[in-house]
Amino acid sequence: MWGTQDEENMIDTYRNIAEGIFDGGVLNSMRDDDNNVNRIDYNPPVRLTEDAKFRLNYRIYMLTVFNKPMRKEARKLLAKGEQLNTLLNTEYQLK
């Protein structure tokens, strides 16, 4: 499902921190039958100690740093795919 073991480990660590902060019942109520996330009209309580806040911020930072090169590579692959699609459409008169 995920790209690498490192990414899975970081996500698991984030989840372990998040489960001590966020109310799973509230998070579940935000999802509809198609698993889309919908905003709620209130600010639910969280259990955010200074330590949890520090750890959560760091994990979010690490996920961002880790995913930035992957997003950059994905954009390159998308551009190449679009170029290939254009070439195939031109070469074989596809619509």
Image (tube, rainbow, N blue to C red):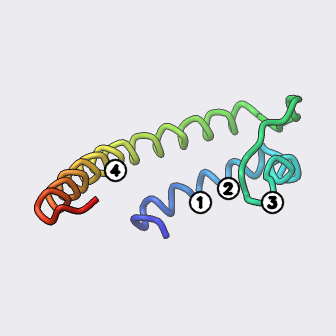
Q: In this figure, which residue is indicated by the disc labeled 3? A: 33
Mark-to-mark CA distance, 3 and 4: 30 Å
Q: Mark 3–mark 2 contact, CB under 8 Å?
A: no
* Element class at badge 1: helix
Q: Mark 4–mark 2 contact, CB under 8 Å?
A: no
Mark 2 nearby-residue class (10 Å; few <14, some 14–19, many ≥20): few
Q: In this figure, which residue is indicated by the disc labeled 4? A: 70
> Which residue type does callout 1 highlight?
Asp
> Which residue type does callout 4 highlight?
Met
Mark-to-mark CA distance, 1 and 2: 6 Å
Q: In this figure, which residue is indicated by the disc labeled 2? A: 16
Q: Looking at the image, which residue sits at the far left?
A: 91
> Which residue type does callout 3 highlight?
Asp
* Element class at badge 2: helix
Q: In this figure, which residue is indicated by the disc labeled 1? A: 12
> Which residue: 18% across, 51% down?
83
| Image location (x, y in percent) of residue 31 | 79, 52
* Element class at badge 4: helix
Which quarter shows the C terminus?
bottom left
> Which residue type does callout 2 highlight?
Asn
| Image location (x, y in percent) of residue 6 | 42, 61
Mark 3 or mark 2: name the one nearer the start of the chain: 2
Mark 3 nearby-residue class (10 Å; few <14, some 14–19, many ≥20): few
| Image location (x, y in percent) of residue 16 | 67, 55
> Which residue: 78% across, 36% down?
39
Q: Nearer the viewer, residue 80 or 73?
A: 80
